[in-house]
Image (spheres, rainbow, N blue to C red):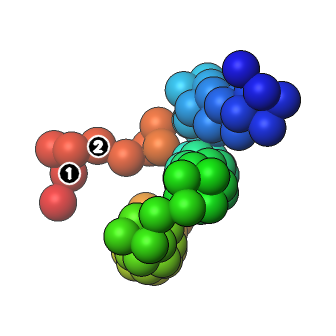
């Protein structure tokens, strides 16, 4: 495994570990998800450049567009949650509450 692949693999794993172990606030969970998506984007872009494939070139742009949509939905949920519950702590949220 090259150092570049190792760095992006570790970036993804660190984001996944942050999502797993630091789930106290919704904002920290969203930041971990964005870090994971950013590492996937850079890894996919480098993979496309290494293959010299023209057919795969729109794939990273499509992924970053979906990542932007995911970020906007996450921020909208964060605002809605903080307005209705008063904070973004995940422990205060309940599926049974309306």
**The quadrant where residue 54 appears:** bottom left
- Residue at figure coordinates x 62%, y 52% from the top left: 50
**The quadrant where residue 42 appears:** bottom right
Q: Neighbour class for label 1 at 10 Å: few (<14), some, many (≥20)?
A: few
**Residue 77 percent across, percent down from the top left:** 39, 70
> Of residues 67 and 92, which is closer to you in this image?
67
**Residue 80 percent across, percent down from the top left:** 40, 75
Q: Are marks 1 and 2 in contact (CB under 8 Å)?
A: yes
Q: Which mark is residue 33?
A: none
Q: Secondary structure at mark 1?
A: loop
> Of residues 23 and 85, which is closer to you in this image?
23
Q: Secondary structure at mark 2?
A: loop
In what quadrant of the picture does the C terminus appear? bottom left
Q: Is residue 81 left or right of residue 5?
A: left
**Residue 78 percent across, percent down from the top left:** 48, 68
State the residue position of label 1: 97
> Of residues 15 and 76, which is closer to you in this image?
15
In what quadrant of the picture does the N terminus appear? top right
- Residue at figure coordinates x 71%, y 33% from the top left: 5
State the residue position of label 2: 94
Q: CA distance from mark 1 to mark 2?
A: 6 Å
- Residue at figure coordinates x 63%, y 37% from the top left: 12
Above or below: residue 75 compared with residue 88: below
């Amino acid at each position: 495994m090259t150092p570049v692949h190792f760095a992006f693999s570790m970036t993804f794993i660190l984001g996944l570990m942050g999502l797993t172990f630091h789930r106290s606030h919704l904002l920290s969970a969203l930041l971990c998800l964005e870090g994971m998506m950013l590492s996937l984007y850079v890894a996919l872009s480098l993979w496309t450049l290494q293959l010299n494939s023209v057919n795969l070139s729109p794939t990273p742009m499509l992924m970053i567009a979906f990542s932007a949509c995911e970020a906007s939905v996450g921020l909208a949920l964060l605002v809605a949650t903080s307005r209705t519950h008063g904070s973004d702590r995940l422990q205060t949220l309940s599926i049974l509450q309306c």
